[in-house]
Image (spheres, rainbow, N blue to C red):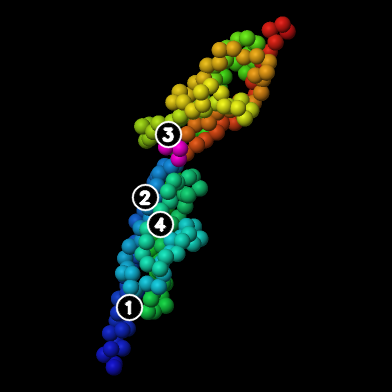
Amino acid sequence: MLLWSLLVIFDAVTEQADSLTLVAPSSVFEGDSIVLKCQGEQNWKIQKMAYHKDNKELSVFKKFSDFLIQSAVLSDSGNYFCSTKGQLFLWDKTSNIVKIKVQELFQRPVLTASSFQPIEGGPVSLKCETRLSPQRLDVQLQFCFFRENQVLGSGWSSSPELQISAVWSEDTGSYWCKAETVTHRIRKQSLQSQIHVQSKYQ
């Protein structure tokens, strides 16, 4: 009986000596998937395991499972770790902390115009300007222009420019543009700009 007790105690000490490891990327971009992997235990030894961000519990599992963030956004940046609670003995263990920084994939677009006070009957060129991260220059973007709540031109296009051949007084209003990845994972909108069409007879 004494030997059995010693074996149980030894086993408990051994379990507590095992370490948890959180495997996660330290740097990702907006729109990337993030997979968190907690390693270091066998399922039969644990009562539950959980993932945490900035000391807040994200998700709880009854066995070891990965945690997936399908499309990262900037607010997913933070300090992550995992924890387990023992099955036979009420010990808690926590892993190392991984600091994840979600980087901006492309800047918020800015709408520019050849003129914000064009003359009636004249052309206007609109441009939706943004900049990709130097590390992700291969990402494809598409663009769309709006006046009030109306889509301009043919809608979404790979071109960041829109040519309007002639504007009239009724075209006066608020204009803005949107830029998004072709996968639709990340979309950003510019601030609104006022275009006031001037009468040619002023």
How far apart are the alpha carbons under marks 4 and 2? 13 Å
Mark 4 or 3, nearer chain start: 4
How far apart are the alpha carbons under marks 4 and 1? 28 Å
- SS category of the residue bearing label 2: loop
- Whether residue 182 is in magenta: the answer is yes
The magenta-colored residue range is 181-185
Disc 4: which residue: 67
Left or right: 95 as drawn, with respect to 113: left
Left or right: 105 as drawn, with respect to 166: left
How far apart are the alpha carbons under marks 3 and 2? 24 Å
Disc 3: which residue: 182
Position of 156 relative to 183 (above/below): above
- Whether residue 158 is in magenta: the answer is no
Q: Is residue 93 visible?
A: yes
Mark 1 or 2, nearer chain start: 1
Position of 94 relative to 157 (above/below): below
Identify the image quadrant of the C terminus: top right
Q: Residues within 10 Å of mark 4 (few under 14, many from 20)?
A: some
Q: Nearer the viewer, mark 4 or mark 3?
A: 3
Mark 4 or 1, nearer chain start: 1
Mark 4 or 2, nearer chain start: 2
- SS category of the residue bearing label 3: loop
Disc 2: which residue: 25
Residue that extends furthest to the right in the rendered view of this protein:
202
Residue that extends furthest to the left in the rendered view of this protein:
3
